[in-house]
Amino acid sequence: MREIVLAFVAMAAISFAASYALPQFGFSSEAQTSGDSVRLD
Amino acid sequence: MLRLIYALLITFSLCLPSFAQDAEAPETDRSATGGATTLEDIMKRQEGLKVDNSFRSGLTGDPGGGRPSSEQLGTLGGASDPELWRALRFDSADITTQVQHPAATVLIQDTGMWWLQFREGPLTKYGFGLVLGMMGLLVLFYLIRGRIRIDGERTGRTILRFKSIERFAHWLLAGSFILLGVTGVISLLGRQFLIPALGPEGFSTIAIGAKWIHNNVSWAFMLAIVMIFVLWVVHNLPDRTDINWLLKGGGIFGGGHPPAKKFNAGQKLIFWSVVILGGSISASGLSLLFPFELPMFAATFEKLNQFGIPQLLGLGELNTNLAPHTEMQYAQLWHAIVSFVLFAIVIAHIYIGSVGMEGAYDAMGSGEVEEQWAREHHSLWVEEVKAKEAKAGGSS
């Protein structure tokens, strides 16, 4: 039971970390399809 | 059992005519239209038959061949409007743009409708058919075989089957897989089934949440696959005991318990299914997560063509000149198809690990299993454990 709880806590932590960190490194599908990446210059 | 096999064969044979119709596409005589699209072509397209567009895909004029516009009676190029639109449709137009988007030069994506129709039609129908079919088979199996009980008398002693880190990796994989499955289904069927029920605004909230969960929980899923691979690959290498186990059907329908090591042949099949199919789902998922950045299908098709596999299957050479959108569409279809297959396999795993077999859940619950259960299902592994314990006891 302890491992199940730990796994879900880890899953939440990994998800929030990925959600925060990936856009910081430029890995964002939203960033690739909007804003500067599609601007006319 | 024989009746069940006949039923499955009949069901499968009923599916064949629809495939046969897809394959039948007689040659069209286009002399009446001077080589242009005929009524037959239009009818074929409406009936969902494959239309060979090669007779017109190359008719895109000569853009550089017109009289220069600086001269008298100069033109804007040697291609007419229909030829220009044809070039746009078949992705052969020479387009330049200031837009930085990777797929910005594709203005018409010819295979988009096929993808949309396949996604909403056969993919959904056969995908859920497979999953529901597996559930039905398991219910049938339960009714015929019942719960697999521990045959011998319980010893009251337990053996540590899975360590804490192994159970953690298993539940990380299981939890993320279920969440990804649910959110994936919401993404796949939302437009067809949830919008009519909840309305666009109600579905929007759910869709945004499902997308966030699906995109971010995927990293936990990938980490868990790596973990279980590292932890268990040594125990899942095929060996001679697997042949005996498979020949005896794992002893599921009686005939005693065939000897097995830490993982029996059935569990090894589950393991490799999860690693290979889960790895493939992860690869196509990454391609979808980073749109247009990780195209995989053109390169894969090229390799398959080199090995002659599609030719062997009568598919001819696969198209390796894929538009960026087509790459994404193939990635989405592959992602969903392989997920459905893995889901069907995992349902069987969940069944046998819970209601299907007495004592099995303990292995991933507390990690400790009843010794009698272990002796019946993993006799060679128990001998290994006991030998190690005796050796450790003797040396201390």
Image (cartoon, rainbow, N blue to C red):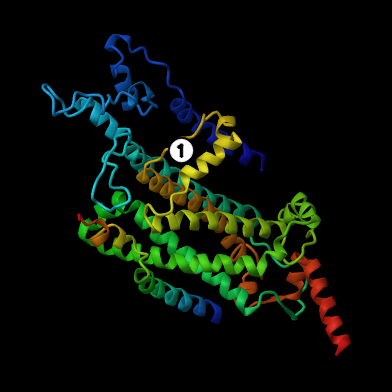
Q: Nearer the viewer, residue B153 or A12?
A: A12
Position above or below: B313 against A19: above
**Placement of the C terminus of chain B among the 4 image quadrants:** bottom right
Residue B155 sits in which quadrant? bottom right
B387 horizontally vs B341: left or right? right
- Between B56 and B227, the one lying in front of the other is B56
User: Which residue in the rendered view is the most extreme toward the top?
Assistant: B32
**Residue ranking furthest to the right:** B394
Q: In the drawing, does residue B57 fall left or right of residue B219?
A: left
Q: Residue furthest bottom?
A: B396
Q: Nearer the viewer, residue B104 or B31?
A: B104
Amino acid under disc 1 = Thr
- Residue B99 percent across, percent down from the top left: 24, 51
The residue shown at (63%, 52%) is: B144
Taking B24 as reference, is B147 above or below it? below
Q: Is residue A18 visible?
A: yes
Establish if B236 lies above or below B97.
below
The picture places residue B213, in percent across and down from the top left corner, at 38, 66
User: Quadrant location of residue B240?
Assistant: bottom right
Q: Secondary structure at mark 1?
A: loop
Q: Quadrant of residue B148?
A: bottom right
Mark 1: give few (<14), some (14-19) or many (20+) Cα within 10 Å: some
Chain letter of disc 1 in the image: B
Give the residue furthest to the left.
Answer: B72
Q: Position of residue B260 (x, y in %)?
A: 77, 62
Q: Residue at x 64, y 62 (%)?
A: B147
- Total labels: the figure holds 1
Looking at the rendered image, the quarter that the N terminus of chain B falls into is top right
Residue at image mark 1: B320
Using residue B276 as the reference point, say whether residue B196 is left or right of it.
Answer: left
Tell me residue B296's x, y (percent): 47, 48
